[in-house]
């Protein structure tokens, strides 16, 4: 059904550095591509393991719109989630805007088809026993749970490196039908009984026939039922009787001939009543499955050793940010969000008439909220900070800040816990004179519009913190006492007002969202190279905005220290920020979902 797309197909060696699939899986290599499906080897950034992802396009209706819940999709999901030692484990089954995704374990080994091709002949009777036992058990379990496979073939039988045999692609017949790709109940010519070729009702007997054909090929390295197309296959089954397996190897017990002849009967009623009864009849005439498992392990080791993907992906394919997507990254976000929210709350409410004890109590509540839910905590911290601006009489600045914070929190922070801490980092980075790292990091990690909103909010915080630190344009520095003693910020409202009334400050501030927007758009490919190029262009936007601000400052004569606009202070700050974001990109590509269009739709329709 899905030729050349089994999850144990040997990797091509082509590095695939792309956006995350489903905001979780980093593509590593393309394993296979069929007529309507692809299989990708990917890294699960949450569970830190390799997985195989099979992708199929969802169908379209008559108007050309994607059908997001086609008939049969629920049945396909149920069929795929079978749990049995001889069935490839399916970890997840998801759909997005236009595709269905089957997330499975990555079977480190070879498909049975590859193995037969490699050895250039049949399997031993012991090895065949291992295959028949495993596939028979898998099919029996599936049938007991109401699931048919309908595409048993060597490419869908996987031999692990320890000799275990597993069946892949359960549920794919239902999935291919649900996604509009089904023909004659799926299947592959040469492994389809007559009823399946003719599009008639299929049953457990259809899988039994395919298993018998597979057994025939294991014992002879030949498939007597193969044909170029459906009509030829139908004619072959109706007119030609396949030679007995003993004709290929006279040492095989003659009883096998009769058993396979019965299991490949033309009509379902001619075959054994169940797969279990077929394997029960056949296994006594085959070899020892335990010996066969050891022999298969040796074959897989011999023929696939040089082509096996390392247990851990290489540094170039999976960087630091992918590895931090799991529990370690979540814990770090919670700690940072708690610290930032505590500072915002204390700094904002210190300007009000609150006494120290209730002020400390409110700050503690917000801190705990941020630790438990970073998005909630940062929202409360920003609200407290805005209240402090109003308490100081900074009404216009407070309204602008509150508006930017609300837009940023509603469309970005409440959806992405990691993004919630980005703008709040600007004053902290200002201590090291590298605040321009904030808009570049926002563009690195967020889609375009959310990145611009986060950068604008961070720029406003930096402008306020720097001016409150008695700094002048371009407001790159923040004084340490402002962060260690947040209450100091309530005493310098005049400095903040002066910065707000300076048009040059706002011209320079606009460089922040523009830089984040450019960085995000260029880094959308989610590779290290695109991120580095985006960082350089984003830094150029910041430089351009500050050059224009310098012109505005000269024209109106309001900037106290005009040399700072183009002097060493700004140059060192921008260069330091650029160098650091380049290092960030070198440590790993952006963890950006490849479905940014669907994210944008959510933002716009929420």
Image (cartoon, rainbow, N blue to C red):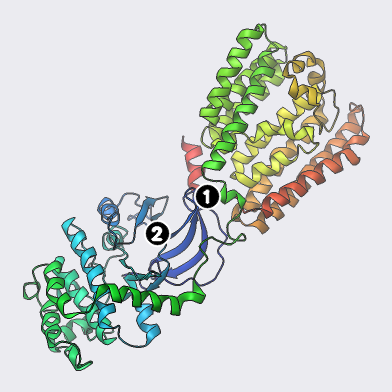
Q: Residue at x 28, y 65 (%)?
A: 182
4 up-or-down from 105: above or below: below
Total count of labels:
2
Q: Is residue 395 left or right of residue 273?
A: right
Name the residue tied to disc 1: 593
Name the residue tied to disc 2: 105
Give the SS element for disc 1: loop
205 up-or-down from 358: above or below: below
Q: Residues within 10 Å of mark 1 (few under 14, many from 20)?
A: many
Per the model, the C-alpha gap separating discs 2 and 1 is 21 Å
Q: Residues within 10 Å of mark 2 (few under 14, many from 20)?
A: some
Q: Is residue 551 left or right of residue 369?
A: right
- Front residue of 594/591: it is 591
- Front residue of 230/194: it is 194
Q: Residue at x 33, y 88 (%)?
A: 121
Task: Single out the residue that lies furthest toward the left.
Answer: 269
Mark 2 or 1: the one toward you = 2
Occupied quadrant, residue 10? bottom left
Q: Is residue 501 visible?
A: no
Q: How far across and how far down the image is residue 325, in percent?
A: 54, 46
């Amino acid at each position: 059904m899905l030729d050349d797309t089994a999850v144990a197909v040997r990797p091509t060696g082509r590095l695939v550095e792309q956006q995350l699939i489903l905001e979780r899986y980093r593509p590593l290599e393309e394993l296979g591509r069929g007529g309507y499906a692809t299989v990708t080897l990917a890294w699960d950034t949450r569970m830190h393991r390799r997985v195989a992802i099979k992708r199929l396009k969802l169908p379209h209706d008559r108007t050309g719109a994607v059908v997001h819940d086609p008939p049969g999709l629920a049945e396909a999901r149920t069929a795929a989630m079978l749990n049995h030692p001889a069935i490839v484990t399916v970890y997840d089954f998801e759909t997005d805007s236009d595709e269905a995704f089957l997330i499975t374990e990555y079977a480190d080994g070879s498909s049975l088809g590859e193995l037969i091709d490699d050895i250039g002949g049949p399997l031993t009777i012991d090895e065949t026993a291992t295959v028949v036992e495993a596939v028979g058990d898998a099919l029996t379990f599936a049938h007991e749970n109401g699931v048919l496979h309908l595409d048993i073939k060597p490419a869908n039988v996987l031999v692990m490196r320890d000799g275990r045999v597993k069946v892949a692609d359960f549920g794919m017949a239902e999935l291919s039908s649900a996604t509009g790709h089904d023909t004659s109940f799926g299947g592959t010519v040469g492994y389809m009984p007559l009823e399946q070729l003719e599009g008639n009702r299929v049953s457990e007997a259809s899988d039994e026939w395919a298993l018998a054909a597979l057994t025939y090929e294991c014992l002879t390295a030949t498939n007597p039922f193969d044909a170029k197309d459906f009509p030829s296959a139908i004619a072959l089954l109706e007119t030609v009787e396949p030679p007995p397996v003993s004709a290929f190897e006279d040492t095989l017990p003659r009883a096998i001939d009769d058993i396979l002849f019965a299991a490949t009967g033309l009509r379902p009623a001619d075959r054994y009543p169940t797969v279990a009864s077929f394997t029960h009849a056949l296994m006594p005439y085959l070899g020892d499955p335990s010996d066969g498992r050891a022999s298969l392990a040796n074959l897989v080791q011999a023929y696939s050793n040089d082509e096996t993907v390392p247990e851990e992906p290489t540094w170039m394919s999976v960087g630091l940010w992918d590895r931090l997507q799991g529990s370690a990254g979540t814990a770090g976000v919670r700690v940072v969000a708690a610290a930032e929210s505590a500072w915002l709350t204390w700094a904002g409410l210190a300007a009000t008439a609150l006494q120290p004890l209730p002020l400390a109590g409110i700050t503690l509540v917000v801190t705990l909220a941020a630790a438990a839910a970073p998005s909630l905590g940062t929202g409360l911290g920003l609200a407290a900070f805005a209240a402090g601006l109003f308490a100081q009489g900074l009404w216009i600045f407070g309204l602008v800040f509150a508006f930017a914070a609300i837009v940023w929190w509603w469309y970005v922070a409440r959806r992405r816990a990691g993004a919630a801490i980005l703008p709040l980092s600007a004053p902290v980075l200002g201590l090291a004179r590298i605040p321009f790292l904030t808009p570049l990091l926002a563009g690195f990690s967020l889609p375009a519009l959310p990145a611009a909103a986060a950068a604008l909010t961070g720029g406003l915080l930096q402008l306020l913190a720097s001016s409150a630190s008695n700094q002048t344009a371009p407001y790159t520095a923040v004084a340490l006492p402002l962060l260690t003693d947040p209450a100091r910020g309530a005493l310098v409202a005049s400095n903040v007002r002066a910065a707000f009334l300076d048009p040059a400050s706002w011209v320079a501030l606009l460089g922040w969202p523009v830089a984040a927007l450019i960085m995000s758009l260029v880094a959308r490919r989610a590779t290290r190279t695109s991120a580095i190029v985006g960082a350089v262009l984003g830094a150029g936007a910041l430089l351009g905005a500050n050059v224009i601000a310098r012109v505005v400052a000269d024209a109106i004569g309001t900037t106290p220290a005009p040399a700072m606009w183009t002097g060493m202070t700004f140059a060192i700050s921008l260069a330091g920020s650029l160098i650091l974001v380049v290092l960030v990109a070198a440590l790993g590509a952006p963890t950006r979902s490849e479905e940014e269009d669907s994210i944008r739709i959510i933002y716009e329709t929420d």
